[in-house]
Image (cartoon, grey):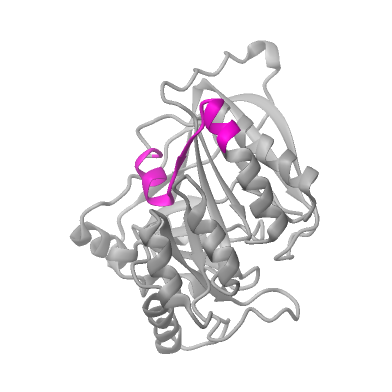
Amino acid sequence: MASVVVAAAYGLGAIVFSIASADATSDLPDRTLIDFAAFAGDGTTERTLERPAERLAERSGSRTVTYARSVPPTARASEIPAPAIPAARPRIALVIDDVGLDLAAVDRLADLPVPLTSAILPYAEHSVQVAREMRQAGHDVLVHMPMEPVGLADPGPNALRIGLSEADIEARILWGLARVPGAVGINNHMGSRFTRDAEAMRLALSAVPDEAGLFLDSVTTSQSRGALVARGLGLNVLERDLFLDHVQDASAIEARLADAEALAELRGWALVIGHPHDVTLDALEAWIDGAQARGIDFITVSELVQHTRPDQPQAQIQASIR
């Protein structure tokens, strides 16, 4: 596993969203609060390895990877320069998890008038057909890979679990990819126990082929090592900023969508995750046109990766789930 060198650079202003939820080990924290805190700090991030040969060398070798760590929020507001206004229009990557079990919801998702990303459960009976329909609608698709949670919740068939052999983990990853053809990568379904085990994540992500070489960490635990391991393996990596619908209430979801817009306007982009609940889909259908009128562009996760290269300074996200 590649060694990690942490580097932080001072000098540019940044806006940080501190995201806090109720339970550090819960796959479904019951609340999420956002605090806006301005502090000085911008960091370096690992470069994205684009050529397969480099990616394979990264997985097997000992090349150093550098990633960002935000500067602690100790500076006084009066000492902090105003953050630069992003040159591009703010972008939101909208990911819908748990897709595939409700075919009526699949049809509603396909009808949304913006590009988005569908994370499809590989054990859904019609996952292959759903993946094809979503791709025809212009969506990216991810394998919403079941992973072991803390507690007794059942993540579903063929879940990745601590203690499985390397061969079993690889077989389950390949099964998931076969069940969601055309997937650009994977993200975790549950997984608050599995994702915090670096060795387990290394075994799982090492089995991901180059054509599906994106890992989206849903951050179901603040102790997740998924993104860090994926970077060390040379995968493209994204991390969830906001959950939309832990509270399945229209006004609560509308507030989370407003938070997503605010983050996108401040940093230039935001990545939010929702689920195919009727109340969530109702809120999205009512919100999208207005968001576009206010200057928001919608992009898929594979497009977002292209806008988050480390040579482009970005405000950092501090996410803690507790």
Judge whether residue 50 is colored magenta: no
- In the rendered image, which quarter is residue 195 located in? bottom right
Pick whichever, 254 or 42, lies toward us.
Answer: 254
**How many numbered marks are there?**
0
Furthest-top residue in this view:
78
Say above or below: 172 vs 82: below
Q: Where's residue 92, x and y in %?
A: 51, 40
Pick whichever, 181 or 84, lies toward us.
Answer: 181
Pick whichever, 164 or 138, lies toward us.
Answer: 138
Judge whether residue 296 is colored magenta: yes
Location of the C terminus by quadrant is bottom right
Q: Where's residue 52, x and y in %?
A: 21, 60
Pick whichever, 277 or 93, lies toward us.
Answer: 277
Q: Residue at x 40, y 63 (%)?
A: 185
Q: Where's residue 308, x and y in %?
A: 41, 39
Q: Where's residue 266, x and y in %?
A: 57, 26
Q: Which residues are magenta?
A: 289-308
Q: Is residue 71 visible?
A: no
